[in-house]
Every structure is written in structure tokens, then in C-alpha cells.
Amino acid sequence: MSTQPEQSFQNHAQMVPGFHYVTGLAGIVFLFWTVWRLISFRSADALYATFGAVALIGTFWYTRSFPLKAQDRVIRLEEQLRMQKLLTEPLRSQSSVLSARQLIALRFASDAELPELVSWVLKENVISGKLIKARITTWRADHHRV
């Protein structure tokens, strides 16, 4: 029995409050404070503090974006392999044109539901990941995300 909650379109987004809210908000407040000090006092110390705040915000941003980019590459590969196994021709060969955004959204579809969804995405040229995920009826949870 899994201790993880059931995933669905409504609850699949993953937020880490300490990172996203506390650290992110602290960085933004620090940036605004240093910019205010730079404008008010125009000193070298205020300028250096502002550079530090910009570097901190950049570090915050890239600390999140680099792992997500690597995760997206892995998801693309996993989904391409899964589609090779689950789809029949000609859908299998057509699936090679799916974008990363489409593949990442399709990862939540159950094996039974995947062929129909891939066919719909290709036929209607659906590019919105949100729209694809909303169409999934049998959700395949992903609890190993960054």
C-alpha cells in the first residue's frame, strides 16, 4: 500500500513551501531592499549588495531550472520508449514528432489510455500540456519528480 496520495490533474503540481515560498520570497524582498538602498544611498556597499541580491535570485532560479531540464530529458526518453512498446504502427512512427511538452504531459496517461490520447494529440495538433493532462481519465502518478 502506497503512502503517496492519489495524483490527479488537480493535485499533480509539486510545490516545496520552504523553497518556493520562503526562500523565493526572502530573495525577492532582499533584492528590493538592496535596490532601494542603492537608489537612496548610492554607495559602493549598496551596489555590491545589489549585485549579491541579483546573484542570489539567479542562483534560486537556476537551482530549480537545471534539474527540471534534466528531468524533462529523462521523461522524454522514458515516454519514447514506452510508446515504442505500447503503440502500434502507424501511430508509433507518427509519435516521433511529439514535442517535449506533449511527451511530458502524456507521461501521466495510463498505458491503456495512451494510444487514444497520442492519436488525439497528433490529429488535433494539441500543444498545450495543460489541455492534454486535463483529458487524462486514468492518471498514472509520478512521485519521483524534482
Image: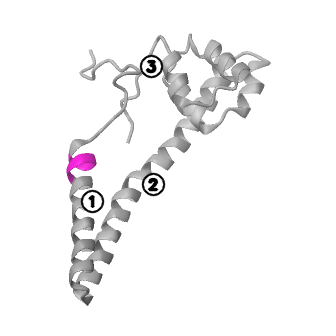
Closer to viewer: mark 1 or mark 2: 1
Q: Position of residue 36 (x, y in %)?
A: 24, 72
Give the residue type that dot 1 points to: Ile
Query: Vertical placement of 131 versus 63: above or below?
Result: above
Q: Which of 73 and 56 is in front in this view?
A: 56
The residue to which callout 1 is attached is 28
Q: On the rendered structure, is 5 left or right of 86?
A: left
Image quadrant holding the N terminus, namely: top left
Query: Vertical placement of 98 versus 114: above or below?
Result: below
Query: Vertical placement of 89 versus 21: above or below?
Result: above
Report the Cα–Cα distance between label 1 and label 3. Answer: 36 Å
Q: Which residue is drawn at 41% across and 28% down?
A: 142
Way the structure is coloured: one colour
What is the secondary structure assignment of the residue under circle 2?
A: helix
Q: Nearer the viewer, residue 76 or 135?
A: 135
How many labels were placed on the picture?
3
What is the secondary structure assignment of the residue under circle 1?
A: helix
- What residue occupies the far front of the structure in this picture? 40
Q: On the rendered structure, is 62 left or right of 36?
A: right
Sequence-earlier tag: 1 or 2:
1
What is the secondary structure assignment of the residue under circle 3?
A: loop
The label on residue 66 is: 2
Q: Residue at x 33, y 35 (%)?
A: 14
Q: Which of 69 and 40 is in front in this view?
A: 40
Circle 2 Cα neighbour tier, 10 Å, few/some/many (<14 / 14–19 / ≥20): few
**Where on the picture, by quarter, is residue 17?**
top left
Q: Nearer the viewer, residue 35 or 100?
A: 35
Range of the magenta residues? 18-22
The label on residue 140 is: 3
- 111 is within the stretch colored magenta: no
